[in-house]
Image (cartoon, coloured by chain):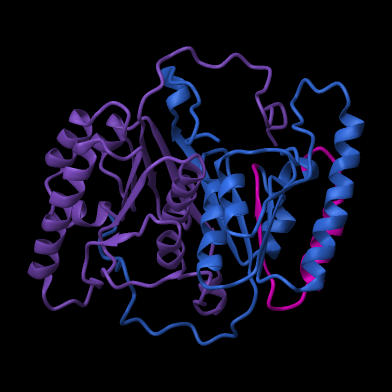
Chain colours: A blue, B purple
Amino acid sequence: MDIETPPLQRDTPKPQGERRGLIIVHTGSGKGKSTAAFGLALRALGRGKTVKIYQFMKVPTARFGEHRLFERLGAPIEGLGDGFSWKSRDLEHSAELAREGWARAEATVRAGEHFMVVLDEIMYPLRYGWLQLESVLACLRARPAHVNVVLTGRSAPAELVALADTVTEMTLVKHHFQAGVPAQRGIED
Amino acid sequence: MDIETPPLQRDTPKPQGERRGLIIVHTGSGKGKSTAAFGLALRALGRGKTVKIYQFMKVPTARFGEHRLFERLGAPIEGLGDGFSWKSRDLEHSAELAREGWARAEATVRAGEHFMVVLDEIMYPLRYGWLQLESVLACLRARPAHVNVVLTGRSAPAELVALADTVTEMTLVKHHFQAGVPAQRGIED
């Protein structure tokens, strides 16, 4: 129990530093990495900010709930992948798509036209060596100061954690798959 | 590194259990508990499902980004609190609001008219003893089988974790407040 922590720090002086774009990382093996990124994106949209969401592992034609919703909000998610799975036979094609996708995402981050850019599941192509970590770090360091970038996926590299402003690790405590409840529409997709 | 884990388990047999409403808990001291709940809610909305979001600690007049956005989507967030902070002078009033709010939320869960009901920050009134844990557990156990309930907040009680289907702990690795970057519109609210 940590009830000494106030839920709303209404009366607490706020930090006096500069307002600037943040690098936010959601990592760990638990649920909620992508959904929390979507939540940040919708909060920004609710404030009238511009948002761009890239998904490195989803196909461009994915029509999960979040794709339908962000399209309705005028901020369609852009899938950059080929629905890669561990049994894919054509990993070189997956790698090529990831590199092409990164070129698009990098250009968007550098252009500075968006308040927030989400790079969902970018840790996969980093882990598989399809993208150069140094290229991603260089882009983040050189981005326009107002751009917030949210990066998700398991096993965030230590250099990215070091560079990031805010890092949350989502840990699986229990999951309904373990109890035999299958994936279902509106929850998992 | 856990690269043996497939990113998309397209070729993996799905669990064969029943589809039913889930109890999903986001706990821990890190960021992302509420934003991940919002992400789940927007995914469900994107699938045409009905969603109701209650916030136990926010005032009914809160107009953060998420309030503006969900209102735009026809699923307005309902604040049940009084913006309680640790320095509040009138804790009994906060407690009364929490109990009244729970009566409303409980009725919604039991009515079964929503695919998903979010009980954001419900762990606070539980920890402060404003709500009876047994009352919340009884409501969850007795709810219509199709209703998904998402509960957020630090320090989820062990009995709730035991009852839940899916529990994620969000752990703070680092936070930009620590580096002196102040809260900013579109990110924190």
Compared to residue A175, the image places residue A128 above or below, namely below
- Is residue B116 placed above or below A43 in the rendered structure? above
The tally of labels here is: 0
- On the rendered structure, is B188 left or right of B119? right
Residue in the image at 87% along x and 41% along y: A97
Q: In which quarter of the image is residue B162?
A: top left
Give x and y (percent) for residue A95.
88, 38
Figure check: B141 above or below B61: above
The residue sitting at 43% across, 83% down in the picture is: A14
Residue A122 position in % (x across, y down)? 73, 47
Residue B24 relative to residue A75: left or right: left
Q: Residue at the spot x=43%, y=52% of the render?
A: B33
Figure quadrant of the C terminus of chain A:
top right
Kindly tell me whether residue A134 is visible in this rendering. no
Residue A129 at x, y percent in the picture = 85, 41
Identified at 43% across, 59% down, the residue is B70
Q: Using the rendered view, name the quadrant where residue B13 is placed.
A: top right
Choose between A150 and B116: the one closer to the eye.
B116
Q: State the image coordinates of residue A62 (x, y, percent, origin top left).
A: 68, 38
Residue A97 visible here: yes
Does B142 lie within the magenta span? Answer: no
Magenta stretch?
A: A127-154
Q: Is residue A37 above or below residue B90?
A: above
Q: Which of B139 and B183 is in front in this view?
A: B139
- Is A156 placed left or right of B110 in the picture? right
